[in-house]
Amino acid sequence: MPNLSCYNPAMHYKLGWIGTAAFQVMDGPKELVFDLAEGQTLPPEFKEGDGIDIVLHPDHPANIAMGMNSGYYEVTHLESGTKIKLAHKTSEWRFDKKLTCEPCDLRVEKNGENYIYKKPGVVVPTKLENYHVLRQAYETRICPLCGCAMNELS
Ligand SMILES: [Zn+2]
């Protein structure tokens, strides 16, 4: 049986404003702003109000641990099918994420330079006390307990 909770579906959004160095994405009433890498522009078919899909492609945790995050977001313009890639490292500073793994009832978030976890009830595995385990979980969005993709809480 494949583990369906590991399936990482595309998320659907609407394009907001488009600037020369960044653009806005609306997730219902919630705003996300993505930075464009130097010299990168959105293709001309990307217009305000258009529907887009965003799929997260995390880098391998070992690379991130060495400070080489080559993960990216794949953004698909729904009308034209045009795809672009946005490097994680360009935008990650904007996001103060709260990640959750529902099957494990685990939350990981950042507090200044520290990473904290919340797992109500039951005995918590000691590996969660390890800074690197939490940092890696936060940066890769992979649950340290079950290995599935973690969801972001707004
Ligand atoms: Zn989990």
Image (cartoon, grey):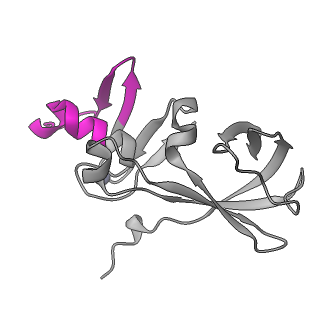
Determine whether 79 is above or below 96 in the image.
below
What residue appears at the point 88 percent right and 60 percent down from the top-left corner? 44
Q: Is residue 125 visible?
A: no
How far across and down, in percent of the image, does residue 85 sit?
61, 59
Q: Residue furthest front?
A: 39
Q: Is residue 61 visible?
A: yes
Q: Is residue 126 magenta?
A: yes
Magenta span = 108-136
Viewer-closest of 30 and 106: 30
Q: Is residue 145 magenta?
A: no
What residue appears at the point 84 percent right and 58 percent down from the top-left corner? 46
What residue appears at the point 83 percent right and 44 percent down from the top-left corner? 16
Viewer-closest of 59 and 153: 59
Quadrant where the N terminus is found in the figure: bottom left
Quarter where residue 67 is shown? top left
Viewer-closest of 29 and 137: 137
What residue appears at the point 74 percent right and 38 percent down from the top-left corner? 21
Compared across the picture, whether 97 is left or right of 28 comes to left
